[in-house]
Image (cartoon, coloured by chain):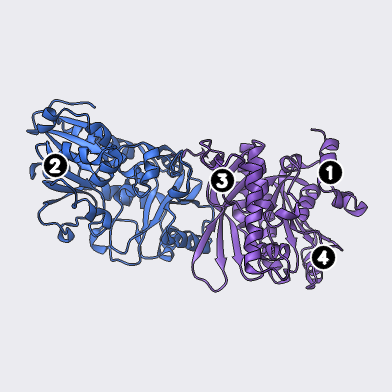
Amino acid sequence: MSDNKVLQSLHRIESGILDDPDLSELCQKSKAGDGVTIFIPNWNHRPYLPRSIHSALHAVGRLREAGFSAEVLVIDDASRDGSQKLLRAIQMLYEGSRLKTLFLKQNLGLPRLRNLALQMSRFRYVCMMDADNELVPDNLLLFLQSIVETGAALVHGNLIAKTQGEEAVRLWSSRVATMRLTEGNYIDAFALVDARKLLRVGGYTSNPRLYGYEDWEIVLHLIAEEKKIVFVPAVMGYYHRNPGSMLQETLQKAERKNDSPSEKTKRSEEAKALMQRMFAQTGTREWDPVRVGYIYHPAVGYIDQW
Amino acid sequence: MVWYPTDVLEYQLLIVHPEGDTALYQEYPEFDLLLPAMLARRLFAACRERSWEIAVCSSRELLNVNTDQLSRATPAVIDPVACAATSGNGSKFFSKLTNAHKRIVVLAEAVESTRYGRQFHLPTNFDAVFDIGFVPQGNKHPFPNVPYHFVFNGPTKEEEQTIAELSPSRERPIPWAVVGPRTPNHLNLIAELMDYELYPGGFCFLQHPSKQGKKGTGLLSPSGLAAVLSKTNYYVWSSDDSFAYYESFRFIQALQVGAVPCKIDGNHSWERADIPGIFPSVRSFCTRVQEEDHWSMYCSAREFYMSRGPLAEHLEKALRLV
């Protein structure tokens, strides 16, 4: 598909973004295939930014040492906690590094922000983070090699989830994609994606009924489009869970202020029902014998499962 | 099923292993099919080295074995509970076993485990239990009416040759690998290994078989695991149980492809076992790998394994006691 057609398709989906003359100029029509854009969205997460940005800049250094290019892109989604001031200070501190920041005047919401990052990225491969995530800098190279070598649309790896005040460790995004994904998502948005492939399928959905579930929708959407999803058995990063985590705030934002717990459950069930209507119409796809995900490691190649 | 002539054993030895159909595994996710398959293969190889009359069959195939033939055989049943469950007809399976001359339970389990105990509450009596491993557990065997025999899980001839041919020059880009069930111990092990930041590029694959689709178990295949370990320096795991047990098969899987087997166990003392590569903590593991290179640690593990004698020799001793 030509770039024009891609943009037409995007225009249909994200007309709100692309209609803004300031933002549409930011789109990178051609993307270099030899590097990664590490994207960090921010909305009122000032205390967490130093950790996520530091890990991202460290990863850029590691990729450069290995002969790849990389940049960090931080988009502030009209924060009201003074994040902008901090980001400007960080940018001055790391002057000359590949750190780009963009400050939005109006809040777009996480899915639109991610689509904007896909369009703005200088590189074809985009590492989608959240402001409270932390990359393992040495390992991003493994994921980049994997996505290049497999031609996958999305590669994911183990995410170590640490909850404030809890000793127990959890591992997220650590299972290979199967049609069980129609019952619930287990592949987090914190992953490396091929911007071209995601844009061609329309990017992250901004359907308000699926707000907070756009990472689940994109995974099933890619599977439906027969795009490759690859699990790389290494630790991609950390998910620092706390009362103000990006995911929880996104979900809270989607809920109305006065929603009761039962209404919240209802909204979640509605989103799940909608996803199943879209991707598991027969109600039997969770038993589909086709193995949709792959395991790959650059040192080994594809790894067989029983 | 293949029978080999011999004159060493009076009765034919028949190795029975759980049916290996992965679809069946979904119905009984608690059974580890990889270990019985490996155990059956190694016992078979050891017996052939001694030119004994030996046959191998799955639990389902046993149902079709001629009763007369069975009356002259001694079945060595690997994990009888799993065998019965995967045979398709548990009562017929045990009824068949009853026709045998003698019956041996073959296990590679901690004797304190529930799974070990369940093997001795079945509708058939066994004449002996063979515990295949690195550390004898006879003093803890809780069923005195079934004689316990320890069989050191030593190398087969083929393994000896494979291990002898390994050289230190092989490229190993993966610093460590943690592969196993998704237990809190393994989750903490990965988090700790990452905390030390020595080698963050480790291979981590924790399976959750019961959550996989009906097709497949979600486990790495034996060839997949071997491919990973052949590129790995240290194969690391932690104890999943509150009792002391050494997983000899993990040791062998690592050694065969040049990885160093490393068990992290802070709950038990292993000094008397003399097995190299057991560490009380991740910290002590990280300290050791900084002080001693991979090949030197590998050679220590190889020396331990090769010096204890071949599996066939240990198996023969045990069989003569039954």
Chain ID at mark 3: A
Along the horizontal axis of the image, is B270 left or right of A210? left
Residue where numbered disc 4 is placed? A78
- Quarter of the rendering containing residue A145: top right
Along the horizontal axis of the image, is B112 left or right of B31? left
Chain identity for the colour purple used in the image: A
Query: Pointer 2: residues within 10 angstroms few (<14), some, or many (20+)?
Result: many
- Residue at image coords 66%, 52%: A215
Residues beneath discs 4 and 3 located on the same chain: yes
Which one is nearer the viewer's eye here, B285 or B314?
B314
Give the Cα separation between the discs numbered 1 and 2: 72 Å
Disc 4 + disc 2, Cβ < 8 Å: no
Task: Residue at the far right: name it.
Answer: A21
At label 4, the amino acid type is: Ala
Quick one: quadrant of the C terminus of chain B? Answer: top left
Name the secondary structure under disc 2: loop
- Quarter of the rendering containing residue A22: bottom right
- Residue at image coords 69%, 68%: A259
Camera-side mark, 1 or 2: 1
Q: What mark, if any, has residue B103 been given in the picture?
A: 2
Residue where numbered disc 3 is placed? A231
Name the secondary structure under disc 4: loop
Q: What mark, if any, has residue A12 been given in the picture?
A: 1
